[in-house]
Image: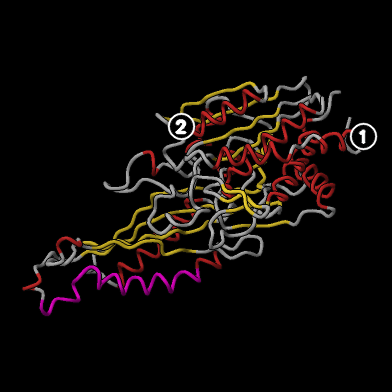
Amino acid sequence: MTLAANSELSERLIACIDEQRLIDSACTYVSTPSPTGSEQAMGEKVREAFEDAGLRVSWQQVEDGRPNVIGTLEGAGGGPTLMFNGHMDTSYSGREPHLRHIFGFQPEAVVKDGRIYGLGISNMKGALACYLEAVRAVKDAGVTLKGDVLIACVSGEIEKTQWGEHFRGAEYRGYAAGSRYLPTHGGIADMCILGEPTEQKVVLGHFGAMWARVSTHGPFIHTAFSVGRQAENSIIRMREVLDDVLAWIPQWEKQSAYRGLDGVVNVGAMSGGHPWRVSRTPNRTDLFLDIRVPPTMRMQEAKDALAELVRELRGRYPDYGIEYEVFVTAPGAEIDERHPMIAAIDAAHERVFGRPPERDIVRWFSDASALTRYGIETVNYGTSSGLPGPDGENLDIEGLLKVATVYALAVAGICEVAS
C-alpha cells in the first residue's frame, strides 16, 4: 500500500502530529545541556523518550559519558530500513564569555512569539524532536510498516578535534565520532535522513574538510639581543608565508569546485610565542587552515595539493624551517538525486508545503560522511531559520511542525505500509 494510493492514510498521519508534544520534546532536549564530550544526560533523556514512545532502545557506549542512543520501531518485514540520524552535542556550552548573555545560546528553552530559542534547537535538537514526533504519529495512526525505522541520536558530531598537548579529551572529539562508532556496532540501515538545518532544502552533496598546520621556525632569542634579527622571528616569517598562502587559496577554490560551487579555505587560527614570556622570540609559529574538499576528490589528492604548496614555500624561504601536518580528514558526501528516498521526501514535502523542495550543495560537514562510507546512503533535509540571529539559535514552531509531518509521510513512503 502506498501513500499515493491512499490519501486517507496521509490525512490520518498528518492528523496524528501533535504540536504541543513536539514543542515539549524540543524544549526538553534544549534544556538538557550536552556540549561535545558531555552527552550522557541528553542520552538518558532520549532513552526515556524512546521508552515512553514504545520503541526498542539500544545504548552504545562510545566512551565514558558519551552514548549513542537508538530507538527502533520494528516493521513486519519485507520493506527497507530507514534511519533518522542526528547529533546530541551542541556547538557551544553556553558558558563562553561572549555567549553568556544571549538567551538563544543557553541550554534552557524559551518559547516566544511562535519560536523556540535555546542552545542546540537549530543544530540539531529540533530535528531530534521531529524524528520522534514522526514515529509517534505513525504509531498513533495505527500504521504497520514493512521496514524498520531507527532514530539514532549520536555523540560527537560538531566540527572540532584534538590537537597538540593542550587540546585533548572528550570535549575535542567530534567530527562524526558517534556516527563512526554507530554502524560498527549494529546501527545500520538501508538509507538515512539527516535533519541538519537545511532550510527545508534537499542537500544532494556537501564538502568534507581537511585541517592542516603550516609552521615557520626561528631562533629563540632574548629581547635584549634581538636587535637587527627581527627578520628571523618566526612570527615575522609567518607574515610572508601567510601572504603566499592567501595567494594560493583562489587556486584551490577553483581546483576544488563541485557542482558549480567553489571550494573554500578558512584561516582558522594562528599560534606563536608565549604571552607569559614575551621577552623571547618564538621558536615556532603555527598557521591553521580549514581546507574544504569536495566529495568527488580523494583526501590524498587534497593533501598532495597542500604538500606541493609547502614544497614551493620551502624553496622560496629555505631558512624558515617550514613544516606541515594534516590532522583532520573528514570526507564529504553526496547522494544521487534519483534515489527513491529523495522521491519520497519530494512527495511528502510537496504535500505539506504545496511545492517541491529546492536542491542545495553546501560547504558544511555532516555525519553523512561517515554513514555513506558504511553503505548507508544519506540525505540532509531539515528545518532552520538560517544563521542564528542576535538572540542566538531559534526555530519557527510552524517549520518544526511541517518538517515533522514531512518525516512522518516519508517514513510511510519509504518503509512501505503493511496495513
Toward which corner of the image does residue 246 lie, by quadrant?
bottom left
Residue at image point 40% right, 63% down: 308
Pick the residue in front: 178 or 243.
178
Above or below — where is 47 with respect to 238?
A: above
Image spot of residue 159 (x, y percent):
47, 49
Give the residue pinned by disc 2: 40
Q: Is residue 240 magenta?
A: yes
| Residue at the extreme front | 112
The quadrant of the image that shows the C terminus is top right
| Residue at the extreme bottom | 228
Horizontal side of 50 relative to 224 (left or right) equals right
Toward which corner of the image does residue 412 lie, by quadrant?
top right
Q: Amino acid at mark 1?
A: Asn
Crowdedness of circle 2 by 10 Å Cα count: few (<14), some, many (20+)?
many
Give the residue pinned by disc 1: 6
Image spot of residue 344 (x, y percent):
80, 42
Pick the residue in front: 125 or 144.
125
Crowdedness of circle 1 by 10 Å Cα count: few (<14), some, many (20+)?
few
Horizontal side of 8 relative to 262 (left or right) equals right
User: Can residue 204 be seen by looking at this rendering?
Assistant: no
Q: Amino acid at mark 2?
A: Gln
Image spot of residue 167 (x, y percent):
32, 47
Query: Where residue 222 is drawn, which disc sits there?
Result: none
Query: Magenta segment range?
Result: 227-251
Marks 1 and 2, how far apart in space?
A: 42 Å
Image spot of residue 409 (x, y percent):
80, 38
